[in-house]
Image (cartoon, rainbow, N blue to C red):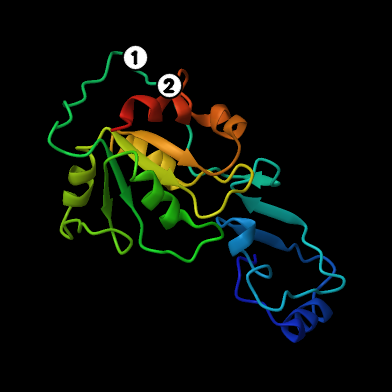
Amino acid sequence: MFSGGVTGIEQWRELISSRRQEQIWLYATEESIYHSPPVQSKPYVVVDNLRYNLTYGYHIKADISQPFGKIVPSEHPSKPTIDPKPSDLAPVAWMSSRDHMYWNRSRFVRDLGNYLSIDKYGKMGGKKLPKKGNNSTETLKKYKFYLAFENSCCSHYITEKFWIALSSYEAVPIVVGPSKADYEKVAPQNLSSTQTILSPLKV
């Protein structure tokens, strides 16, 4: 199984030359194409005669498809009880620790802040989350909306950011990532579009 770490041409040639005929090679990744070797290496690694038998990952076309999450119908379909959100906080929260992305996510959030009130946590924001226990989750549960922006906009790349917003923060995720059609395949029914959500939030 390969999930990264082999990016040199000579390493690949050695592995290919010693590969047994009956050996099955599986490529596994949870990252987008922009963060997966050999794409992330510079210069790009091009290896002749490199063949995988199987692929494993989030993408729907992988031989073994394993998405980051899914909606499962409740065995007890009663209306869930969700605590009211405090009104003294910004309606939207965002948390990020990295700025080196394949699109300028932090600038997008900064520009969005001209129209919405956003509380920003992590290295890219001015607020800090508690470090002990589940206090960070409890803090983010106070918000109505959460910016679940992916680091790459690739097909079917919907990561834990989206699912944690729903399951742990009990917030409505505002998304940037793959196509709207990809989100509609996995999101809860009747989830409004980003435009519909952002309209009443403008301040």
Element marked by disc 2: loop
Q: Which mark is residue 42?
A: none
> In the rendered image, which residue does mark 2 sit on?
73
Residue drawn 50% across the image and 55% down it: 151
Residue closer to the observer: 83 or 100: 100
Instruction: Judge from the rendering whether residue 111 lies leftward or rightward of residue 68; answer left or right.
Output: left
Q: Residues within 10 Å of mark 1 (few under 14, many from 20)?
A: few
* Residue 157 shows up from this direction: yes
Instruction: Judge from the rendering whether residue 69 lies leftward or rightward of residue 7; answer left or right.
Output: left
Element marked by disc 1: loop
The N terminus - image quarter: bottom right
Q: Which of the 4 image quarters holds residue 203? A: top left
Q: Which mark is residue 77?
A: 1
Q: Which of the 4 image quarters holds residue 83? A: top left
Q: Residues within 10 Å of mark 2 (few under 14, many from 20)?
A: few
Real-space Cα separation, disc 2 to disc 1, in angstroms? 8 Å
Image: 36 above or below 55? below
Residue drawn 43% across the image and 21% down it: 73
* Residue 71 shows up from this direction: no
Image: 70 above or below 45? above
Q: Are marks 2 and 1 in contact (CB under 8 Å)?
A: yes
